[in-house]
Image (cartoon, helix red, strand yellow):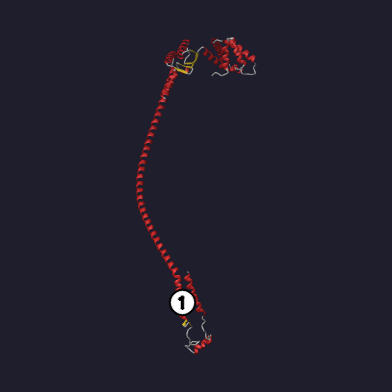
Amino acid sequence: MIRRFARPYARAIMDVVQSPEKANAIRFELARFDDVRKSSGDLQELYPNPGIEHDAKLKVTTTIGKRLGLSDMTMKVLGVLIGNHRMNDLDSVVEALAEMVRQATDTVAAEVRSAHELTKEEQAELRRTLEKKAGRKVEMIVTTDPTLIGGFVAKIGSEVYDASVLGKISRFRESLG
Amino acid sequence: MRTAAIALLVSLLAAFVYAQKPESQQPNEVAHGSEKVGAETAHPGENAGGAHEGPKFLGLPSWIWKLANMIVFLGVLGWLIRGPVKGALASRHDQIQRDAQEARERRTKADQMAADIQKRLTQLEEELRQIRERAQIEGERQKREMIAAAEAEAQKILQSARGEVDNRLKHARHELTEYAGQLASERAEQLLRDKITDADREKLFRDSLNQVEEVES
């Protein structure tokens, strides 16, 4: 869920870079940084801590950014978020930015859960199928869910395509009920 | 009235005149106590005052006058009261006649009333008989209706019970089927998880792709 404060940040990034592709690149960089932040308990405590000075937070962020190979633009965005004490809401900003990029590129997000890890060929094939269904470009967000046993479940907007073995078993069970 | 007054006046006058005539009394006639007893003893059968005739008025013995006075008095009295008595008797006669007439009328009315009551009693008996008949007919009708209603209610209860049994049976069948399906699906799921291979997963992926393509969005 996108929080209200996140949209102005996303809009500002879009306005500054003036290109959906560049904005998308920043989005992925921010997402990578957020993954690191979420994986570290220390970092999650660092940013909301008022006892630690802004410069110290910025220094840590810069160090991590360099290791991750983040662009200057991404670092500036992170600096602004640190200054506004919004670092722990970075995922919301990323999500808002993704939505704006999709709007700008006429792309729709497809959340795909697959029973096994999809190869690139399988992903491409699935994308083509979903784009044919959606009638426009599809940005797939793929996750692996072994409980599905086989097949996949794709969700585009409010449409859900359940082509998993688990779904078939569930429908069979419901048909008996 | 005036005549009555005159007659009364004459009677009183006659009585007054008679009363004014003093009777001569011999001085020796007066004997008192032992003298009178002695005289009677010495001359038994003689009057103490000696033999004499009764007092007279206008040459007639006073008893005639008394008698005449009595007759006149009674005559005047009769003449005087004749009218009122006659009127009173006539009035009483009329009153009795009226009372008798009224009594006759009352008797007639009472007879009429008795006849009416008798007639009403007769009618009442007839009405009672009709009421009894109607009550009997109504009772029979209500009895039939109650029996019919009870039968309908029994039928309804029976149908409801049958419906309930059917529903429960259906529900039990449904639960049983569901349970069997649950078991079967769980078993199938377990088997698939245990036996599935990478080749199967790829094949299932292809099948899923085809399935999504066939879906009409």
Instruction: Name above or below for residue B25 compared with residue A26.
Output: below
Taking depth in this image into account, of B181 and B132 the one nearest to the observer is B132
| Residue for point 48% across, 70% down | B2
Residue A61 position within the rendered picture, expressed as x and y whole percent measured from the top left: 61, 13
Number of callouts: 1
| Residue for point 35% across, 51% down | B123
Q: Is residue B72 visible?
A: yes
Q: Left of A132 or right of it: where is A41?
A: right
The chain that hosts pointer 1 is B
In the image, what residue type sits under mark 1? Met
Mark 1 secondary-structure assignment: helix
Residue A18 position within the rendered picture, expressed as x and y whole percent measured from the top left: 56, 10
Taking depth in this image into account, of A112 and B195 the one nearest to the observer is A112
Residue B165 position within the rendered picture, expressed as x and y whole percent measured from the top left: 39, 32
Q: Is residue A141 visible?
A: no
Residue at mark 1:
B70
